[in-house]
Amino acid sequence: MTWETVIGLETHVELSTATKIFCSCTTEFGGAPNTHCCPVCTGMPGTLPTLNEKVLEYAVKASLALGCTVTRRGRFDRKNYFYPDLPKAYQISQLYLPIGRDGQVPITWGDGERKTIGIHELHMEEDAGKLVHDPWQDLTQCDYNRCGVPLIEIVTEPDFRSGEEVIAYLEKLRSTLQYLGVSDCKMQEGSLRCDVNLSVRPAGTSELGTRTEMKNLNSFKAIGRAIDYEARRQIERIEEGKRVVQETRRWDENKDATYSMRSKENAQDYRYFPEPDIPPIELSDGYLDHLRAEMPELAEAKQARYQAQYGLSGYDARMMTGEKALADFFEDCVALGAEPKNACNWIMTQILRKLKELGAEPGRMAFTPQSLCRLLALVKEGSLNRNTAVAVFDAVFETNGDINEYVKANGLSQVRDTGLIESVVSQVIGDNPQSVSDLKAGKEKAFGFLVGQCMKVLKGQGDPKLVNQLLREKLEKL
Amino acid sequence: MDILDLTALELGQAIKAGQVTIPEATRTALEVIARENPKNNAFITLCADRAMDRAKALQDGLRPDAPPLYGVPMAAKDNLCTQGVKTTCASKILGDFTPPYSATALERLDSAGAVLLGKVNMDEFAMGSTSETSFYGPVKNPRDLTRVPGGSSGGAAAAVAARMGWYALGSDTGGSIRQPGSYCGVTGMKPTYGAVSRYGLIAYASSLDQIGPLCRDARDCAAVLDAMAGRDRRDSTSVDGPYGNVLAQLDGDLRGVRIGLPRECFGQGLDSQVEAAVREMARALAGRGAAVEEFSLPVMDYVVPTYYILASAEASSNLSRFDGVKYGWRAEGYEDLTDLYEKTRTQGFGKEVKRRILLGTFVLSSGYFDAYYKKALQVKSVIAGAYRDAFSKYDLLLTPVAPTTAPKLGQSLHDPLKMYLSDIYTVPVNLAGLPGVSVPCGADRDGLPIGGQLIGPAMGDALVLKAADAYQQEVRP
């Protein structure tokens, strides 16, 4: 039998506001335990939450960008459960009236395959703290720094059929939220966390199978592998005549397998009810219009513009806009006077290569658009040849070292002294009579050899155009 | 002049006039407390040294333009957070809790020159109508020490009645200021929901809780309200309202004011002596120019169940944070996390608190949510609508505060349902978010105080107090 995999995602995204969702503590990552908290985010008796307007703004912007209907009169709800990382014993979240609903996210993957993923809802909530287990002292300590860090949870419809689609969606989501400036979406720091709900069914049927939820997926790669593994596991079970148990499973990166964490069949009752400490959120037309007007140009619009305005190919434009930091870099180069196609080539071939080598992200590189433009200018004016320029780039990239100084210090400027080149040319011709006669006999290959000999004497720094020209002139005079 | 005979405003004037110093007034109050507290158990925590230091500092800073309550000694219910002073909610579970912050209401009174004498007793977590559920023992009614002072702000009412300070702050979720005010013969006011910031008030039922004053008369209530009301950015349910000059509006003139008496509040279950006293109060208000008439308010049958469902639901969530992990009391001898929670909460909370947590957990549970909690929310809005309709015809409503005068100690707790039903006249005011004031209006044959309740529309706090004050002027000997 052929099986179809059905997947829905719940993605938690940390918003990049400077302060927490219900108090003015910093959201900065890290920090000594319990130094980024106050009586409000630790839920001390008598304290009250007050909504950070920036969180609302970011959540509305994300809703708009994901094509959601924004809830005009919303509110928060309490999700009640006991756990030491949750100091109020309830999480302020949204169940009944989430800020965004019924969105659509078009995705493209593979060889231009397309589909639209439905967004069930987008809601705001607070993060919980962190428990640190110390097996040596046999104790558990609570760090409340993360309590109250603002999150949005984006829940899709079960619209995915493969890991490829899921990854295409997550890349699109990350790009969109980064362009909006509402989140940095760093999976390593946990600012983008994804739970995968997966079930299988015979191809061609419409009823959903029993699903499992997978957690602890720390990279796109892990997500793809976990989906493949879990779909295979479920299919095998069903084919063996066993049933799939509705449960939460944990992905173990090292073992390349998922493990049961807890069964959903005796699920907790969260006793949700409307949060009485925060008045209903009313959004006016004016407020929404204002936010719509503030929406930045997103990846797709940029792609189209790069093709039309700069003549980039569709592929190049997509590469340039995949991550906001890269698109910003490209646009800065163009603004500094770089020729767009040339800048794009350098970014694609050199910068992306280097980032990959170093395992670094475009948002974190030291190398600046100014530096790239200086390098391009040196090539254009003939002071550096392309190969030397790449060597310079490699040398300065990590620290964004000064290009002019590096070229000077290493004597890399191109030799364009006609007198010097002429004397080298004469010397090479004198030293290689065989090649000269080969050339006269019509063996054009010998010319390349002679150029190479000249460059060798010039330590690779001769201006290739000038060397070619002077060598040709000299040979004709012979 | 015996300064104990003065109202808070009169004492403030005497202080400004140099007739009495703030340390003298504070010492006098502390002496009364030392004498009376062993009898009535009104205080849980006394801040004698702190109060005297504060009194001296205030005296040194006394200026002719000081606010009206400058230097006046007062007390605060023990569910209002006080920085550096133990705040127990009369519970074992918070027995050693000292907050690092103060309630906004107390901060504002502090800047108006209040001298905090101590923290007063109450029903545990403000759950109760008799102040007998306190872990620190029951409060006794200063008018008759064999009787309860009412609750949950029983310590606050007893303190004012026994002259252990000139005024006190209480909290009112379903009548917890007004009913003890009535039982102890003091004026107690619940402001409009949102008029006073709840920041620093340890929550019982967040959507109903409101801080308010218990005073010797309505004028003092107005002065306290003026000092503490108004929007606070730390409480997003607080509102900016017509506060700040309420006192100035108490001119004793009720001409043109229409007062409605809901017929349903004068029927079955109401003690005849209480009814007679409240009707007499209506006549006195008419004597000041008000037009008084009866009308029908057909929602009274639903107010008590609605209140207990909503209040318990919120309480079950609000009190979940008391789990022995972060602060307060923790049970010993637990085996794992669940055992720590269970033992701490089983041993740390009293019976009435656990009853309401269980009730609230039940009504929020999946499968029961719609039938109880959701339905109660709908009824709440029907009740609020009925009051809105009433205020389209009347400026104020007048009802009894409680069906009877103060019961004997030990008579109520064995029958919680009966105790809940006695909240019938006060709880709808919280459900509708309205201002209400309890005004002493006579006594029964045993000399026990009776209270009449004036209710106003939302933000009508000044009118409520104006009518209470007019009545007090009318009956003042």
Image (cartoon, coloured by chain):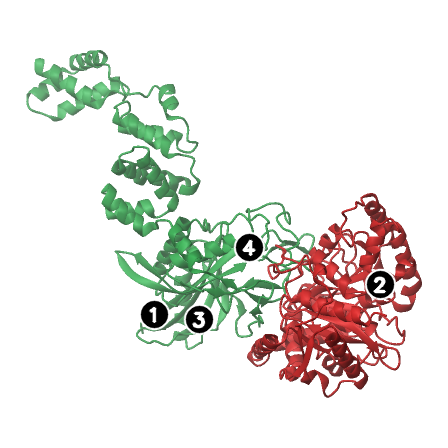
Chain colours: A green, B red
Q: Horizontal and vertical percent for residue A400?
A: 41, 31
Q: Are marks 1 and 4 on the same chain?
A: yes
Q: Who is closer to the viewer here, B101 or B427?
A: B427
User: A293 above or below A101?
Assistant: above
First-in-chain label (3 vs 4): 4
Disc 2 residue type (three-letter): Phe
Q: Are marks 2 and 3 on the same chain?
A: no
Local packing at callout 4 (Cα closer than 10 Å; few below 14, some 14-19, many 20+) is many
**Foreground mark, 3 or 4?**
4
Q: Of all residues shown, which one is farthest toward the right?
A: B35
Local packing at callout 2 (Cα closer than 10 Å; few below 14, some 14-19, many 20+) is many
For disc 1, the chain is A
For marks 3 and 1, give the CA distance: 13 Å
Residue at the spot of label 1: A4
Tell me where residue A308 sits by quadrant: top left
Disc 1 residue type (three-letter): Glu
Q: Horizontal and vertical percent for residue A286?
A: 42, 57
Q: Are marks 3 and 4 on the same chain?
A: yes
Q: Are marks 1 and 2 on the same chain?
A: no
For marks 2 and 3, give the CA distance: 58 Å
Disc 3 residue type (three-letter): Arg
**B187 left or right of A450 in image:** right
Q: Who is closer to the viewer here, B85 or A360?
A: B85
For marks 1 and 4, give the CA distance: 40 Å
For disc 4, the chain is A
